[in-house]
Amino acid sequence: MAELNSGDGGGGKKKGHVRSKKQNAGVDLTAMVDLAFLLITFFMLTTSLSKPQSMNLAMPDKEDKPKDQQEQLDVADDRSMTLLLGEKNQIVWYYGLPDNPIEGPTKVGYGKNGIRKELLAKEKTVLAKYGDPKKGLIVLIKASKKSTYRNLVDVLDEMAIAKVPTYAIVDITPEENAMLEKEGLFTK
């Protein structure tokens, strides 16, 4: 039993007077301890723990096919935007084909004034041209060997924020590595 004692009751003589001895005051804390454990148990069982959130990401099959048997998808150059992830937390993007880009290459950073602003502008351009949301912007994400995992996750977050309908993570080509080298974001 939990009990709280409040000290000595005092009896004894003071100035020649005899006082009666008072009994110590005691408080039984058993009920309060029981209540505390009931409340802790209640809140542990009724709160919902935050569940981890994940983003859907479709990746190609891992089966290796010879280069002559691989499917080559043609992508309209006026609908495609390529993001090259370099070192120093920078992105180089171009609009169109790598050998003859319609716009770019342009170096930007992450965030709302960086790549997000460019993605939203290109989405509006493509939607205005085609008028069909199914024929929206296609973004190819290509990470160099010097980019970090965080850079890739940040770009995927930007895709979700900008609501880009179609994007893919693709291997970077030697021509694009040269483009990163030219922009000063990739050194061998």
Image (cartoon, rainbow, N blue to C red):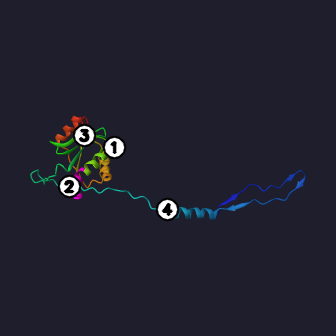
Front-lying residue, 154 or 102: 102
Callout 1: SS: loop
Circle number at residue 106: 3
Dot 3: element? strand
Q: Which mark is on residue 130?
A: 2
* Amino acid bearing label 4: Met
Q: What x and y, as percent, mark residue 132?
A: 22, 58
Q: Report x, y in % for residue 41.
A: 52, 63
- Spatial CA distance of label 2 from label 4 is 54 Å
Q: Which residue is identified by label 4?
A: 44
Q: Which residue is mark 1?
A: 113
The answer to if 69 sits in the magenta stretch is: no
What is the three-letter code of the residue carrying label 3?
Thr
Pair 3/2: label in front = 2
- Specify the principal SS of the magenta part: helix
Please indicate whether residue 71 sits to the left or right of residue 36 in the image: left
